[in-house]
Image (cartoon, rainbow, N blue to C red):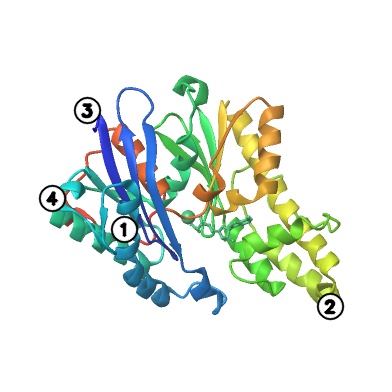
Amino acid sequence: MVAKNEKIILSIETSCDETAAAVLSVRLGKKWPQIKTLSSVVNSQIGLHAKMGGVVPEAAARAHVQNILPVVKKTLLEAGISQLDGRQVVIYEDLLKKIDYIAVTVGPGLAPSLIVGVEFAKALSFALGKPILPINHMLGHLYSPLKNNKGSKAKDVFPMVSLIVSGGHTILTLLKNEKEYRVLGQTVDDAAGEAFDKVAKLLSLPYPGGPEVSKLATLGKPTINFPRPMLTQKNYNFSFAGLKTAVLYYLRDNPLMPKSYKLKANLCSSFQQAVVDVLVAKTMRAAKEFKAKSISLSGGVSANLELRNQLRNSCNKNHFKFFVSPIKLCTDNAEMIGIAAAFKLFNGFKPTGYKNIKTNSNLSL
Ligand code: KG4
Ligand code: ZN
């Protein structure tokens, strides 16, 4: 039985190299949206792109074309919206009708990848006669930590300072409430995740580099004093390209270093600590300046345990509530797209028909 104010959202995400779909049940009322994830499937193309050392856009799009239907079918099956008939997954029309909205990432991201998800969602919207919610991928990251708001009232949460750290973006945002936000600052060159990936490449670690660098960092100590770019500047922008170059020069000047596992681990730990110091310091400064009640952390780099722990400790010390997603919600997935869709509906957004939906690979927050 579906409750009166309960809506079912099927969300789709194909902005980079993950083909993902999720089904969420959302209760919308006057209070904060109550969100239950019925299923979430992520098909990662890591194996495909690892061979090339990074994401190849055309290969990513071709893989999305191959994966999208099986991923959506599996998601529906796991949500109980489709049923197994022998060995074949059969999506029954009457069960599909339970879906109220189709949410899809329209940008930012790789244009060939975005097109696959968006055109698939449009075809589904046409076939089912259900409206589409176009979602900004960064809003997915931004709202994802708010899903598990266990009983906090909006007045105890906002204003909120939100740090989004992903492979393509590093953005500090101020949320006045569930609806109104403004960007305080962002990276002027490389994103934090991009810096992790580039440092991993310098150390010949496999793609994607972020998790590899952080794994190695757990075995080392921050013995090298790398620069903390823009740490003391009185703005909320970031810069990580220089830090990556500092690692490059360090490796050039210490050619024997990469041969020692221990030294490599120390380098990873030192680089990671430099990134964490800048991210934590600027986020805390913003939270104090704007008298925030809470801080949230999201995006692929928020899977980094040192960043999570050090920002959490700083929040505890300074009496800010801290919101962070479980690790599986940090890197790209469709559940976060459904969460952002739920907040959009909660905020009064009116979904449209499929004809008005377009991709925008440079969409900003
Ligand atoms: O949000 P995301 O999945 O994709 C984008 O929207 O960009 O973020 C991917 C980024 C990659 O740069 C990856 O290396 C980084 O997140 N990442 C990490 C960790 N896990 C993923 N960086 C540092 N430490 C991690 N544990
Ligand atoms: Zn992302």
The residue shown at (32%, 71%) is 65
Please indicate whether residue 308 sits to the left or right of residue 270 in the image: left
Tell which tag, 4 or 1, sits nearer the viewer: 1
CA gap, disc 4 and disc 3: 20 Å
Q: Which residue is mark 4?
A: 129
Q: Earlier in the sequence, mark 4 or mark 3?
A: 3
Q: Give the quarter of the image for residue 291.
A: top right
Q: Residue at x 54, y 59 (%)?
A: 167
Q: Nearer the viewer, residue 263 or 36?
A: 36
Q: Is 158 positioned to the left or the right of 351 in the image?
A: right
Structural crowding at the residue carrying mark 4, measured as other residues with C-alpha within 10 Å and reported as few (<14), some (14–19) or many (≥20): some
User: Is residue 216 depicted above or below 100 in this figure?
Assistant: below
Say if residue 278 shows up in the picture.
Answer: no
- Residue 72: give its label: 1
Cβ atoms under marks 2 and 1 closer than 8 Å: no
- Between circles 2 and 3, the one closer to the viewer is 3
* Residues at discs 4 and 3 in contact (Cβ within 8 Å): no
- In x, y percent, where is residue 36? 38, 37
The amino acid pointed to by label 4 is Gly
Q: Earlier in the sequence, mark 3 or mark 1?
A: 3
- Neighbourhood count class around disc 3 (C-alpha, 10 Å): few under 14, some 14–19, many 20 upward: few
For mark 3, what is the residue? 4
- Position of residue 90 measured from the top left corner of the image (x, y, whole percent): 22, 59
Would you identify the image quadrant in which residue 120 lies?
bottom left
Name the element at disc 1.
Answer: helix
Q: Nearer the viewer, residue 191 or 203?
A: 203
131 w.r.t. 88: above or below: above
Residue at screen point 25% across, 57% down: 121
